[in-house]
Image (spheres, grey):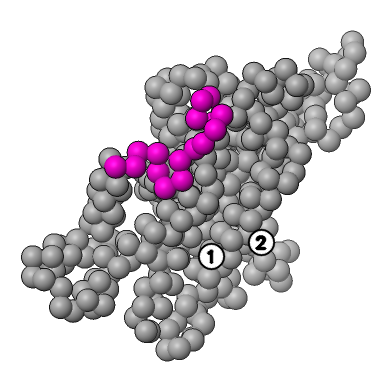
Amino acid sequence: MQLLLESLFNGVAIGSVLMMAALGLAIVFGLMGVINLAHGELMMLGAYTTYVVQMVFKLPAFQPIYGLYVLVAIPLAFVVSGVVGILLERTVIRRLYGSPLETLLATWGVSLILQQFVRSVPLAHAAGLILALVLGFGLPLVLPHRFFEGARARINRAITWAVSALGGVLLAGVLASQISRIARATSRNVDVTAPKWMRGGIEWMDITFPVPRLVIIVMTIVAVVGVTWFLNRSVWGMRIRAVTQNRSMSDCLGIPTDTVDVLTFGIGSGLAGVAGVAVSLLGSVGPNVGGSYIVGCFMVVVLGGVGNLLGTVLASFAIGLLTDLIGAGRLLTIWPDMPSPLAGTVTFFATTSMAQVLVFALIVVFLQFRPAGLFPQKGRMVEA
């Protein structure tokens, strides 16, 4: 019983990380049909945002509340990755809708650019640039619409971007002067140290449950519930579903489809940033941290059924459980009388990397018989 509970928890923990990483992709790929190979790099930006926030909270002025930096990093990572995703959608993706091959190649190129960006540009300068983008895109949403209408519209937009650029320069200067570690380019991995309340574990039934993984599980539950509520209960969520099912009819009914595209891609990208926060709590953060999750994310979305959040949840937890049972060798312990040929195969795959290979191979076999996944699309979404 103890071994079974431990395997179940580890499977849920692994599945939660996959779920956090795949949730944003389930929206972008599942609802919009965009194959975004830069999704892992958006996770990377969220992870680096967590690191920068941690370093800021180590300053003397913020040390009394250092333990809260993770709670601050989560919304900031969402905003940072979301803004970068919106910029990507407005400049690249919007011209490639309906062209999956071109989208795949373009986003792959963007992923390489983002990786080289974090290798070459000091984190302080990168933070300033992102702040300028956030202000540049965010101020028009906050300021009155009449400010951007009429004869002075272009001048006011120029003033807005000038103020945004000034804010970015000031932030970069402050960070570079106060925190030496983020004043220089970082081509090496950096570490995010969990606050005291996230260290150690909780003992229950002779099983130790690591607090960081429990926090990630809670983050995943909140994210899934929030996305489900947004898509099914909010006005903009219903508009997203309407555009997904029938874009031309939604346009005829007055739904701003361009705005829906921006919002959908921004939310999916922002969720990738939140996943980056979760990933940063488990290990080192580097330029390639998101690349190790991108294949698993696509597998989760395809296995669960494109555009189906319930399928994404079940698929991620199933993959996590199988990976733990095989990779940690628990399957042999649970089934000690396993036939020798099968036991030899399980022993061969009893490492994390080899277990992932076996699980992905099993998924490929499963998709041969059920190519639409666990929960295939129905109705007009299929016709579209």
Q: Magenta residues?
A: 369-384
Instruction: State which quadrant residue 154 falls in.
Output: top right
- 276 vs 151, left or right, is left
Q: Position of residue 288 (x, y in %)?
A: 39, 45
Residue at horizontal 58 percent and vertical 75 percent from the top: 196
Residue 320 visible in the displayed image: yes
Q: Is residue 317 above or below residue 130?
A: below
Considering the numbered disc 1 on the image, is that residue within a helix, a strand or a loop? Answer: helix
Residue under circle 2?
71
Residue at horizontal 86 percent and vertical 32 percent from the top: 143
- 227 vs 253, left or right, is left
Residue under circle 1?
217
Is 222 or 228 nearer to us in this picture? 228
Query: Crowdedness of circle 2 by 10 Å Cα count: few (<14), some, many (20+)?
Result: few
Q: Position of residue 364 (x, y in %)?
A: 28, 44
Residue at horizontal 66 percent and vertical 31 percent from the top: 242
The span from disc 2 to disc 1 (Cα, nearest Å) is 15 Å
Residue 375 among those drawn in magenta: yes
